[in-house]
Amino acid sequence: MRLKYLAAGLLSLFAVLAWADAQQNIRQSLETLNFPVSVSSISESPVDGLLQVQLENGRVLYGTADGEYLIQGVMIEVNGGDMRNLTAEVEAKAVSSVINTIPANELVVFAAKEPKTHITVFTDVDCGYCRKLHEEVGKLNDLGIEVRYAAFPRGGMQSPTARTMQSIWCAEDQQAAMTRAKQGKSVPTSNCDNPVAQQYQLGAQVGVQGTPAIFLANGTLVPGYKPAQALAGEAIANQ
């Protein structure tokens, strides 16, 4: 009986050591490649022989235990034709934990009287489709959708748009300043300690490539403008 327990203990120890080696191998491979995003965690994937590498920005890679092969792409479960994008599900969950922890006082929020859910929109005040979406914020609020704006000046932090957005975040009435800017009107220059640069960096980290980039409450990304009624339906279905 003691031999049985000893054998089980040794197998458990070998498994732990092998797992530690696998994680170290993958981390070392990413370091060798000067990969720009840190690893949050490494776990088993649904596919034998592949490990799931969760990055701090919410994105996912896959790798072999020896660290010799890294895969950046989508893992799809066929499941008899009932397709599931497993990568997107994992990434959305991780991204939601990042996006939804942005302090409310660092966002420009257009609240709904009877909120059902919320969306977080990385926006650029000079973007045409951002302006079109803003025209429908009232409709979204009426449909129970709280709109939370984060800053993403597409031209970078040295652009005139970035300076305008800093003034919006420093304005006494942020909502009015946002609306003026989205209408193409000037916004009084204002300076303060603001989160515009931080949000711009965060947007890049979570995969924002254009604006508006709309994140639903569960982390699902809607890339670009969508009419209020359709967007509200998606937001409520993806809480």
Image (cartoon, rainbow, N blue to C red):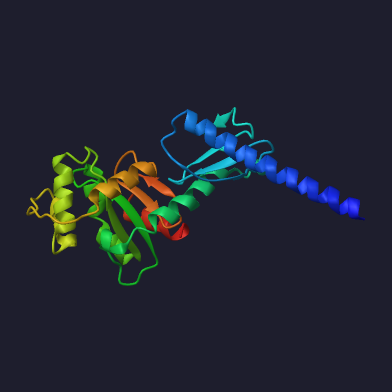
Q: Residue at x 56, y 35 (%)?
A: 26
Q: Please indicate, yes or no, whether residue 113 appears anywhere in the rendered image.
A: yes
Q: Residue at x 37, y 54 (%)?
A: 231
Question: In this image, 239 relative to 203: left or right?
Answer: right
Question: In this image, 54 relative to 172: left or right?
Answer: right
* x and y percentages locating residue 139 in the rendered image: 28, 61
- Image vertical order of residue 194 relative to residue 204, above or below: below
Q: Quadrant of residue 107?
A: bottom left
Looking at this view, is 36 or 47 the one in front? 36
* x and y percentages locating residue 186 in the rendered image: 7, 50
* x and y percentages locating residue 31 in the rendered image: 48, 33
- Image vertical order of residue 217 relative to residue 23, above or below: below
Q: Quadrant of the N terminus?
A: bottom right
* Residue sticking out furthest to the right: 1
Q: Please indicate, yes or no, whether residue 80 appears anywhere in the rendered image.
A: no
* x and y percentages locating residue 122 in the rendered image: 30, 49
Q: Residue at x 26, y 56 (%)?
A: 136
- Image vertical order of residue 16 relative to residue 103, above or below: above
Q: Quadrant of residue 210?
A: top left
